[in-house]
Image (cartoon, grey):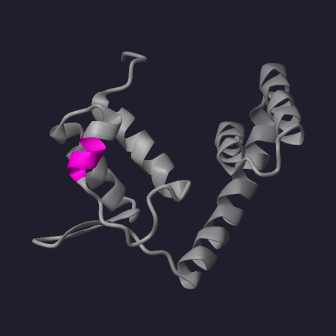
Amino acid sequence: MSAKKSLSQQAYEALRHQIIALKLEPGQVIDEQILKEELGVGRTPIREALQRLAQENLVTIIPRRGMFVAEIGLTDLQRLFEMRLALESLAARLASERGQESHWAAMEQLLDDVRNLNPASNERFSELDEAFH
């Protein structure tokens, strides 16, 4: 398998990041044409990425009305945090059992990067958090 990402995967990652970073706000209409220009990819990769995001409930597709960034409510957040607590506890336990010295060194570097981070840099913090996990 090639290490190079498909255009669909690149579009998916870029759009997911924009949604998580609130560059695309909840309820915002998604304009495919603007996304094509911003991301420099064609219609098919954008549509494939949006379908995948819809499966993950990050995008809402309403036939004959359009596509929107999904709204998130308090109940959704509570369920998300409950699930993350269970999954991250398991992940931490498995990492402690299976980790190697190279993993610990990489994690230590990420922690150093977080410690030296400008508190106002939410986007960079999100990148480091994702890399850490």
Image quadrant where one finds the N terminus: top left
Q: Position of residue 124 (x, y in %)?
A: 69, 41
Task: Give above or below for 78 relative to 128.
Answer: below
Residue drawn at 41 percent across, 62 percent down: 58
In this rendering, would 74 be left or right of 3?
right
Residue located farthest toward the bottom when viewing the structure as drawn: 75
In this rendering, would 89 be left or right of 70?
right
Q: Position of residue 27 (x, y in %)?
A: 38, 72
Residue drawn at 56 percent across, 54 percent down: 21
Q: Nearer the viewer, residue 125 or 93?
A: 125
Magenta highlight on residue 34: yes
Q: Position of residue 101 (x, y in %)?
A: 84, 21
Task: Give above or below for 44 relative to 87.
Answer: above
Residue drawn at 27 percent across, 38 percent down: 37
Q: Toward which corner of the image does residue 61 lie, by quadrant?
A: bottom left
Q: Nearer the viewer, residue 104 or 17?
A: 17
Q: Nearer the viewer, residue 104 or 46?
A: 46
Task: Give above or below for 52 relative to 67.
Answer: above
Q: Nearer the viewer, residue 105 or 73?
A: 73
Magenta highlight on residue 124: no
How many marks overall?
0
Q: Position of residue 57 (x, y in %)?
A: 39, 65
Q: Toward which corner of the image does residue 63 lie, by quadrant?
A: bottom left
In this rendering, would 80 be left or right of 61?
right
Q: Main secondary structure of the magenta part?
A: helix
Image quadrant where one finds the C terminus: top right
Residue located farthest toward the top when viewing the structure as drawn: 2
In this rendering, would 3 be left or right of 41?
right
- What residue range appears in magenta? 32-36
